[in-house]
Image: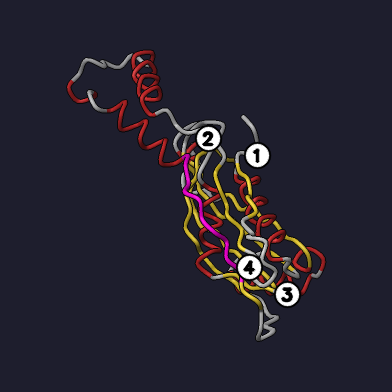
């Protein structure tokens, strides 16, 4: 399992006057849904389930399709615009819902992301902040890495003065098995630039995001 299942593909067309557009593409190997369905059939058999049952007839195909959906993300373009109005206060999108797949148990974890940045020369379309969260959450993940990937992607492409990302998620591998701590939320944060260095900037983000700290 590689920890770099994602890549950023530079999508400049070389024109100096064009806005930089960055295309985010998922570089994982395409899912072989048929082979995955066979494997699910074998798993069910190994788990002592009656795979001859009419009720389970279509289950391998459905499970394979569900995992394929959770593991793949379509490419999209991270469009940025010049910050002509010199807006220099916090931009924050709160409670972006996301779902991902824990790489240790293949069980989902899901919750919300709060994503903020302090613009410099460029701003980004607000919906794109949610798209970045979606993009990196598709795939086998751990919450810590997911949080950092979102922050690093925004920092390196926006050259913002600060970036702050907080994820709050419930992990099914904690809720349904093992310690069975249902309702427990795991909180992770990734702070870059002024959000990392400047306590008041960080505090403003946490206050506006509604996060106790
Ligand atoms: Zn897990």
Specify the quadrant that holds the N terminus. top right
Going from the N terminus, do you reach mark 4 or mark 1 first? 1
Q: Report the image quarter containing ligand 1.
A: top right
Of the two numbered discs 4 and 3 in the rendering, the one whose residue sits closer to the viewer: 3
Residue name at image x 47 percent, y 58 percent: 97
- Extreme residue toward the left, this view: 54
Q: Distance between the residues labelled 4 and 3?
A: 13 Å
Question: Is residue 80 depicted above or below 86 in this figure?
Answer: above
Q: Looking at the rendered structure, which numbered label has been put on residue 120?
A: 3
**What residue does disc 1 label?**
4
Going from the N terminus, do you reach mark 4 or mark 2 first? 4
Residue name at image x 65 percent, y 50 percent: 149
**What residue does disc 4 label?**
116
Going from the N terminus, do you reach mark 2 or mark 1 first? 1
Q: Does the residue labelled 2 lie within 8 Å of ligand 1?
A: no
In this rendering, position of residue 64 left or right of residue 213 = left
Q: Position of residue 132 (x, y in %)?
A: 56, 57
Q: Number of marks in the image?
A: 4
Q: Distance between the residues labelled 2 and 3?
A: 45 Å
**What residue does disc 2 label?**
179
Specify the quadrant that holds the C terminus. bottom right
Going from the N terminus, do you reach mark 2 or mark 3 first? 3
């Amino acid at each position: 399992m590689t920890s770099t299942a994602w890549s950023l593909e530079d999508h400049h067309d070389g024109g100096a006057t064009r806005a930089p557009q960055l295309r985010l593409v998922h570089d994982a190997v395409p899912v072989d849904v048929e082979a995955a369905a066979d494997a699910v059939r074998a798993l069910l058999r190994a788990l002592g389930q009656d795979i001859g049952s009419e009720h389970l007839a279509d289950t391998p195909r459905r499970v394979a399709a569900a995992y394929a959906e959770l593991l793949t993300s379509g490419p999209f373009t991270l469009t940025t615009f010049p910050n002509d109005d010199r807006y220099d206060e916090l931009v924050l999108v709160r409670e972006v819902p996301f779902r991902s797949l824990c790489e240790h148990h293949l069980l989902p974890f899901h919750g919300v992301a709060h994503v903020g940045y302090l613009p410099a020369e460029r701003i980004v379309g607000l919906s794109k902040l949610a798209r970045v969260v979606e993009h990196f959450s598709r795939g086998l993940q751990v919450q810590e890495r997911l949080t950092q990937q979102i922050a690093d992607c925004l920092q390196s492409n926006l050259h913002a003065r600060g970036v702050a990302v907080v994820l709050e998620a419930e992990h099914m591998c904690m809720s349904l098995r093992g310690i069975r701590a249902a309702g427990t939320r795991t909180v992770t944060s990734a702070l870059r630039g002024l959000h990392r260095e400047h306590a008041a900037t960080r505090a403003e983000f946490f206050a506006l995001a509604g996060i106790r700290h």
